[in-house]
Image (cartoon, rainbow, N blue to C red):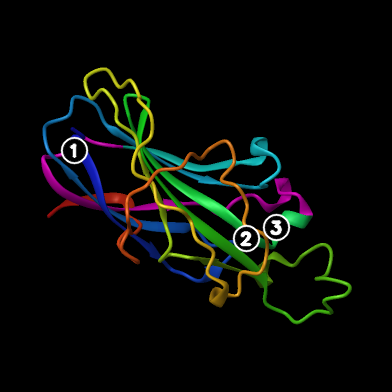
Amino acid sequence: MSLVNVVGMVVLDNPTSFQNPFQFEITFECLQPLSDDIEWKVTYVGSAEDSSLDQVLDEVMVGPVPVGTNKFVLQADAPDHTVIPPEDVLGVTVVLVTASYKDAEFCRVGYYVNNEYSDPYDPETGPPSPLDMTKVTRQILADKPRVTRFPIDWTNGAQGTSTNSTNLEMNESEAMQSPVPSLGAASTPSDNDVTPGNFEGVDVTGMDTL
């Protein structure tokens, strides 16, 4: 039995500028007292072809965690575009929010991200190079998360195999025309049905017990 269940995640400030922070309002329930803090991590997939380009945008420890339902806002800086291959800055990629206990990951939520250049340009020549990053807009497909849950040993933190994942589905009506990337080395599938908009981001500036 999992002692911590992520029950809601809301993407805040979406869509927004590429340079603005990511913000997720996270709601989770804790069923029993925990001896350690929970680690939350935000990872940006820089290239579907090279997992070494994944960027960890933030890692925070949250605790002590009270028993009951808790809510906080997790905020992470925007990725460093200078280490992303120029051909991968625009288009579709993935951002991952993961939760771990004693170094064992027990929940992962992945979202598709679409980056578009706001100024018109000739599709034959492409956008200007180098890109003016102040004109790049980031939109997260917030109603199509992929949720993966991992059974772990809540005493020692050992991790088992993943269970219950939902697929990230491309919604063409969202104007995401680029090929769907793999989630890279940071991701693995799981299969829980997620109600659109059920998961939201949480800010670690403070945690509320509901």
Query: Quadrant of the image for the N terminus?
Result: top left
| First in residue order: circle 2 vs circle 1 | 1
Residue 159 placed where, x, y %? 35, 24
Res 89 label: 3
Q: Amino acid at mark 1?
A: Val
Name the quadrant containing residue 108. Answer: top left
**Within-10-Å neighbours for mark 1: few <14, some 14–19, many 20+:** many
CA separation, marks 3 and 2? 9 Å
**Within-10-Å neighbours for mark 2: few <14, some 14–19, many 20+:** many
Disc 1 on helix, strand or loop? loop
Q: Amino acid at mark 2?
A: Val
Task: Identify the magenta region.
Answer: 62-86
CA separation, marks 2 and 1? 35 Å
Residue 151 placed where, x, y %? 29, 31
Above or below, 52 relative to 80: above
For marks 2 and 1, give the one nearer the viewer: 2
**Within-10-Å neighbours for mark 3: few <14, some 14–19, many 20+:** many
Q: Amino acid at mark 3?
A: Val
For marks 3 and 2, give the one nearer the viewer: 2
Magenta stretch encompasses residue 83 = yes
CA separation, marks 3 and 1? 37 Å
Please say if the residues under marks 2 and 1 sit with CB atoms less than 8 Å apart: no
For marks 3 and 1, give the one nearer the viewer: 3
Q: Tell me if 89 is positioned left or right of 79 in this view.
A: right
Residue of label 1: 65
Magenta stretch encompasses residue 82 = yes
User: Image point 38% across, 57% down: which residue?
Assistant: 24
Residue of label 2: 92
